Structure formats: C-alpha cells, structure tokens
Amino acid sequence: MYPINLEGKKGIIFGVANQRSIAWAIAQTLHQAGAELAFTYQGPRLKEGVARLVQPWGDAPLMECDVTQDGHISRVFEELRERFGSLSFVVHSVAFADREEMAGNFYDTSRQGFHTAMEVSAYSLIPIAKHASDLMASGGSIITLTFTMQLVYPGYNIMGTAKAALEQEVRHLAAELGPRGVRVNALSSGPLDTLAARGLHRFVDLKHIHAERAPLKRNITHEEVAAAALFLLSDMASGITGAILPVDGGYHIMGV
Ligand SMILES: NC(=O)c1ccc[n+]([C@@H]2O[C@H](COP(=O)([O-])OP(=O)(O)OC[C@H]3O[C@@H](n4cnc5c(N)ncnc54)[C@H](O)[C@@H]3O)[C@@H](O)[C@H]2O)c1
C-alpha cells in the first residue's frame, strides 16, 4: 500500500494497450492507493487484451475511445456521468505517429503525418479536459505524458512537435481550469519499453544514452512514473498545476 490514499476518488485512464503501457503501471498504483477506475481502449483490436487486464477488478467501466472520434469521447463521459456521477482525475496516456514519419528526416514530415500525430497526441487532451472538467464540480486533477522537454531527439521527429504542443496545452488548460479547482500537469518520462516506444527507430540507443548521462546513471522504471502520477493526482499536489514534472533520473539537466 502506498502512503498516499486515493480512497473515494474516481478517475479514468486513457491509454492502456497492454501490460507494458505506462497507463497500466499508473492504473495499478492508483488501484493500490484505493482509487476507483474506469478505462478506455483504442478500438476492437485491443478490447480483449485490456478487458483481460482489468477483469480482476470487477465491474470497472471499460469503454471504446478512438480519440480521433468526437462521438467516442463524448460517449465515454456520458457513461461516466451515469456510472460515477462525478470525476476526480484523468490520466491521458495516448500518442501516435505513423512509423514512416519517425524513420527519416524531420524535414520530410508529410502533411498527413503531421496532422495524425498532432490530432492523436496533442489535440486529444483538449476535448478530454473539457468533458472531464464538466464532471469535476469539486475540483480535479488531469495528467498527461510527455517526453521531450524542448530537446531534439533524432528520430523522434513529428512526435517532438506534438509533445511541444501538448506541453503548451497543459499550461493553457491549467490557466483556464485553475479557477474551477482543476489542475493540469504532465509527467515527462524517460524512455520505457512499451509498444509506442518500439516504434522509435533509435529507441535502444536512446535508452543507453539516458542511462549513461542521467545523474542517477540508470534508466527509470514504470513504477517510478506511476508513483509520480499518484502524487500529482492526489491532494498532496494540491498546489501544483501547469507543471511538466521530469521523471527521467535527472537527464534533462545535463548539457553533455
Ligand atoms: N515509452 C516511453 O519511453 C515514453 C516516454 C515518455 C512519454 N511517453 C508517452 O507515454 C504515453 C503512453 O505511451 P506508452 O509508452 O505507454 O505506449 P503504449 O503504446 O502502451 O500507449 C500508447 C497508447 O496510445 C493509444 N492510442 C494511440 N492512438 C490512439 C487513438 N487514435 N485513440 C485512442 N488511443 C490511442 C494506444 O492504444 C495506446 O494505449 C504516450 O503519450 C507516450 O508518448 C512514453
């Protein structure tokens, strides 16, 4: 049991694809802390796997949500209103870019590749925050996952642009939703082996470089990101909004 208690809090997690997903590590930690959770899955291909993961937790709501579909997003929150009544937090752990956009030069990014990455990885936070905040009459906490901290990673290409947009959205949403007691923050995670990370051509190099250069001299773990998520979603972080919190072993401070 974690020292932070989320009993009585209800939240939704977007972005579980399998047991390696950062969203799944966060879900397990929040569950252990006593939170009541709802989940979404991207589409029929992932439904069975995600259902199998959440099955031991009884009747946790599990809903399809392709974030490119406005109707899916609004349906999710309608169902949440019926099932939960109100909402305490949201975990947005969703990103996508076409594989070929990550393979070559950034200056070869296609118009469609740009559009897809921005729509899924950045835009999606906006309607989710809007719908979620409508269910947060007593305040709430929204987190998303980012990576770049304004650095250039060869091969991260359009995803770096999408993360820059996402990080600015965090600040803008934090400013607009703050007066309603809704906090919006991001965790900037170091590299972790997941389905999305496997799409990066130089992911293994990236991991090695992080472990070598980070002050902690190692890669971070899923559990460390999940623990930071637990903190940001809890009342312990009641004074924190608009922040991008690095969970990267300190990599972001190093010049070389
Ligand atoms: N793995 C890393 O090294 C790392 C580091 C920093 C940040 N992140 C970020 O963490 C988040 C989670 O990624 P992950 O590494 O756990 O990989 P993952 O593949 O497990 O999760 C990505 C999720 O995005 C979902 N998704 C993609 N397109 C979607 C769509 N159209 N509609 C709904 N859902 C969609 C996938 O179904 C999946 O659940 C992403 O934002 C990623 O950029 C990952």
Image: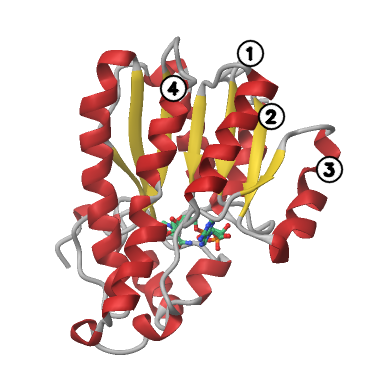
Badge 4 element: helix
Mark 3 secondary-structure assignment: helix
Q: Name the residue rendered at 45%, 31% in the picture.
A: 131
* Residue named by callout 3: 55
Q: Name the residue rendered at 52%, 43% in the picture.
A: 73
- In this view, the residue in front, 159 or 223, is 159
Quarter occupied by residue 203: bottom left
C-alpha gap between disc 1 and disc 4: 19 Å
Q: Quarter holding the C terminus?
A: bottom left
Q: CA distance from mark 1 to mark 2?
A: 13 Å
Query: Does residue 48 appear left or right of residue 154 in this picture?
Result: right
Give the mark, 1 or 4, whose residue is nearer the N terminus.
1
Which residue is farthest left? 255
Q: Residues within 10 Å of mark 3 (few under 14, many from 20)?
A: few
Q: Please tell me whether mark 4 or mark 3 is closer to you in this view.
A: 4
Tag 1: amino acid: Gly
> Crowding near pointer 1: few (<14 within 10 Å), some, many (20+)?
few
**Label 2 to label 3: alpha-carbon separation:** 15 Å
The amino acid pointed to by label 2 is: Gln
Mark pair 4, 2: CA separation: 27 Å
Residue occupied by mark 1: 8
Helix, strand or loop at mark 2: helix
Q: Tell me which numbered mark, 4 or 2, is placed earlier along the sequence.
A: 2
Q: Which mark is residue 134?
A: 4
Asked if the beta carbon under badge 4 is closer than 8 A to the nearest atom of ligand 1, the reply is: no
Give percent across and percent down for residue 252.
Answer: 24, 55
Residue drawn 44% across the image and 39% down it = 128
The tag on residue 32 is 2
Viewer-nearest of discs 2 and 3: 3
Relative vertical location of residue 180 with respect to residue 196 in this rendering, above or below: above
